[in-house]
Amino acid sequence: MKKLILIAVVSLFSISSFAQEGLQGTWWAAGQVSFGSEKTGDLKSTSNMILPIVGYFAAPTVTVGLGVGNISNKTETGSLTTAESNTFVVKPLVRKYWNVTGNLYFYGQAALPVMFGKDKITDDKMSSFGLEVSPGFDYIINKWLTVETSFTILNVNSTTTTPNVGDKTTEFNFNANPMNSVADRTFGNLQVGVKFLF
C-alpha cells in the first residue's frame, strides 16, 4: 500500500511540474496519412494523402508547425486512365495551449493550408488558399507521446481552377458552423491522433 501511495505522489508531482514548465524548446511530429480505393465494375478510383507535420514549442504554451505533403487521385476505366491529379500541400499552423488539469490541455489552432495541383490528363491547374480554425484537447501521456482530438469550427477557402482551354474559375467557400445539417448533426469533422515529442 505504501508503494502505491508513493507512486501516486510521484506521478502527481511529475504532472504538476510538467504543467508548470510547459513544453518550451520541445520539437514534435505528427501528420495525416490516408489511402482509399473504390471499384464499381470496370471503374476504379484511388486517392492517397501523405502530410507529415513538424513543429516547435516557441513558448511554454505556444507552438508553431509546418506540414508539407502530397495528395494524389486517379480514376481508371479498365486499362484506360480517365483522370489523374497530383496536388502539393503546404500547411503552416500555430497553436495556443491552456492547461485544464494535470496533463490535459485545451488548445486553439489556426492553420493556413495552401495547395497547388495539376490534372495530368487535361493539364488543368488548380491553386487553393485557406484558413482553418480548430479547437481541441491534447493529453500528454509521457515525455514523448500525446493524444489529441480536434474539430473545425471555421473554414474559409478560395480555389482557382485554370483549364488548359477556356476561362479560369474561382470558388470561395465560408463555413462557420461546427455542426452539419440538422439531419445528421455531425460535429465539425472530429479528428483523433497522436503527436510525438522529441
Image (tube, rainbow, N blue to C red):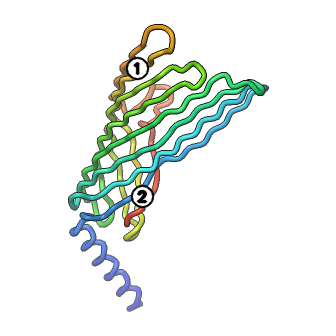
Q: Residue at x 31, y 82 (%)?
A: 9
* Mark 2 Cα shell of 10 Å, populated few (<14), some (14-19), many (≥20): some
Position in image of residue 176 (x %, y %): 33, 29
Q: Earlier in the sequence, mark 2 or mark 1?
A: 1
- Is residue 166 placed above or below 23 in the rendered structure? above
Q: Residue at x 30, y 66 (%)?
A: 102
Task: List the residue tagged with mark 2.
Answer: 195
In front here: 108 or 115? Answer: 115
- Mark 1 is on which residue type? Thr
Task: List the residue tagged with mark 1.
Answer: 160
Query: Label 1's element?
Result: strand
- Is residue 131 placed above or below 166 in the rendered structure? below
Position in image of residue 182 (x %, y %): 45, 25
Q: Quadrant of the C terminus?
A: bottom left
Query: Label 2's element?
Result: strand
Position in image of residue 81 (x %, y %): 69, 25
* Mark 1 Cα shell of 10 Å, populated few (<14), some (14-19), many (≥20): some
Q: Residue at x 40, y 90 (%)?
A: 3
Q: Residue at x 22, y 69 (%)?
A: 21
Q: Quadrant of the N terminus?
A: bottom left
User: In the image, is 194 to the left or to the right of 34?
Assistant: left
- Mark 2 is on which residue type? Lys
Label 2, label 1: how far apart the Cα atoms are: 33 Å
